Image (cartoon, rainbow, N blue to C red):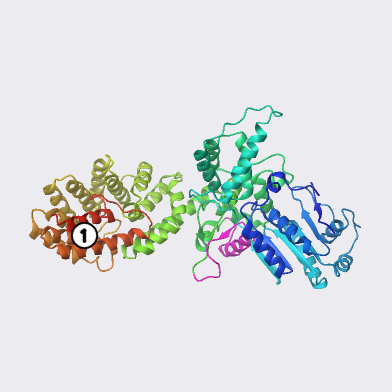
Amino acid sequence: MGVRVRGQGEGAGRPERSGRGAGGLIGRSAELAALRRMLAQSRLVTVVGGAGVGKSLLAEHAAAAVGSSMADGVVRVRWWDGAPPRRRTVAQTVTAAMDGGSADASAPVAELVARLRPLRMLLVLDDFDPVRGECVRLVRELLDAAPELRVLATGRHPLGLGQEAVLRLGPLEAADTDTVGPAVTLFLERLHAARRRASSPSRGRTPVPEDRTADELRLARDICRLVEGVPLAVELAAAQAARHPLARLAGMLESTQGWLGVADAPLRRHRSLRAAVGAGYELCGTVERTVWARLSVFPGGFDEDAAVYVCSGGGLEPEDVPAALARLVLASVLEPVRDPGGVLTPRYRMPAAARGFGAERLRSAGETAAAVSRHLHWYGQIASTAHHLWSTGTHKRAVVLVRDEEANLRAALDREPSGGDEASTSLALAVDLWFWWAVCGHAEEGRVVLCRLLPMARSDTRVCGQALWLSGWLAACTGSPEAAELLGQAWRVAVLAGDDATVGRVSHVLGALALEAGRTEEAIDRLREAAETIPVHAEHGPPATVSWALLAVAQAGGRPADAWRSVRRASTGPEPRHDLWTRSMTQYAQAFVDHSRGRRSRAWRRARKALAGAVGVVGAAEVPAVAAMAGPPGAELIHRLIADIEAGGR
């Protein structure tokens, strides 16, 4: 018995779309080998994955590979979507496939079971999602009655039978490195094929000019990264190369991807990315659809608490959300970032194609503004939590939290506030992340965010003064000429608001700038004012200890006794005992003062400790530290001091 293919619905019996079948599998050798092993060990194997990841193509190749070992061959049944199904049961459709297309419309399940009982056969149930419930019942009966039968199924959701082995198929690797991964290989192969078709003389079209090899590879990587390596999306994007230059195509994919499509795909749902994702949406219940749409406001990973906060309301109870998340994971709409059964809190992410489709559903329901607002308020709380973690000295936890939530925090800050209240919430969020901008190497990004948000928020509030000061500090860190003006505005707002901490921190930055410019006496005056003005345990910025430490650095050259007293004030403050960053600053000042007094050995040891602290803080963020005196003393600045000590200079 050979391979027989029978479909249900429009397009039954057609061969695979040439774009996907002609070139064979690309980048799936490990998955194909794993699937063959599973078929050898299990009687029921299901390939599960999201829209367009290539489940059917992988199953087709696996069936071809193992078909020769099945004495009675392979029978493949496919349910085509996009058209009303024929009035046949799953058993009748399988019987029709075995008979080459004709079947008795009244053929009972018992008759099929009797036919399959003595056979050694592989039955492929491809794209079973529209008839999943009926497939579950039939497969259970067949496996109980036919001991030599093996079943290979593909769908977005496992069948859920006890003896089922599940292979979860993900996208192709779309790395940002210089290597040519499988997603880029697939894209380039389809790209060149599309260009050849577009420039064929029979079509009478002008060929699209080839990009240079380096540019083509770079743009191919960008496009594959944007579509997240989903094979269907990669192929649909490559098909657009006949119409658009690659640079323009990459720009078009930045905002939305549902428009990707071709007109000649035999499967209706493969004619566009929107249709492919929408086929799964149609199979979801009302609660899952609502949660799917509202989750589209998360561009990055999220946990269950965040999902409940953002998705509940409007007729959806909070207790309904966790179960909907589990069902969306089973339906391959959500991807678990952490194992839901593990020790850590489970996290999820929504692929770009599903997120874009959900955003369209959210807009059509008129719920975008509400979901975006709840997302902003939730991540305002996340930023506040990160700020308090940093303030209590748990720097690594603060940095890890921000890094995990970076995509969502950035989205919350990048969205246009709908009014003054949202602008103030966004501004407070940005101020809470002061350590991320200033200490962890994101000064320019933070400066841009603050400069965009400041004109939208009220100018007479304490948070506005803090934001102006932070913006001025970040401008000083990046060498922007706006620093002095921003700091002047911050001082005026802080004085009117009675915010001593911000007044002192303005003096701190002005003193740091004066020290960097060589105006030592001005720097000493400014830094002393800052150290004496900033209250103990003041939040949203460096503590007074940092000002005392930098004052010691300023005094070290001409006032060694004052410098030693200042560094003692810094080292006896409340922060260094638990604050790694402040301790690193204090150790840097101690090393600087010791070096200026000729105590090279002690200075070298303290500088090495300061370096370990600076590397420990920014190492969790995986970014370089700031190297200017106007900003925190990063690793590069401490390296300079160590080199000077080792060279014997003063």
Q: Position of residue 194 (x, y in %)?
A: 64, 38
Q: Give the total of numbered labels.
A: 1
Q: Quadrant of the N terminus?
A: bottom right
Asked whether residue 22 appears in the rendered view, the answer is yes
Q: Position of residue 8 (x, y in %)?
A: 80, 52
Asked whether, in this view, residue 417 is left or right of residue 521, the answer is right
Boundaries of the magenta span: 314-343
Dividing the picture into quarters, in which one does residue 379 lie? bottom left
Q: Quadrant of residue 528?
A: bottom left
Which residue lies under the disc numbered 1? 588
- In the image, residue 634 above or below residue 184: below
Which class describes the residues within 10 Å of circle 1: few (<14), some (14-19), or many (20+)?
many
Question: Would residue 158 be seen by someone viewing this image from the given angle?
Answer: no
Q: Give 558 or 601, whichever is nearer the viewer.
A: 601
453 left or right of 98 in image: left
- Quadrant holding the C terminus: bottom left
Judge from the rendering whether residue 4 lies leftward or rightward of residue 215; answer left or right: right
Residue 275 position, x and y percent, is: 67, 46
Q: Which residue occupies 36% across, 48% down?
A: 446
The vertical placement of 44 against 294, above or below, is below
Element type at marker 1?
helix
Magenta stretch holds residue 85 = no
- Which amino acid lies under the numbered mark 1 shown in the image of this protein? Tyr
Which residue occupies the foreground of this view, 430 or 496? Answer: 430
* Image position of 190 (left or right of 348): right
Give the image quarter of residue 204: top right
Q: Residue furthest front?
A: 68
Asked if residue 316 is among those painted magenta in the image, a careful observer would answer: yes
Observer-nearest of 581 and 33:
33
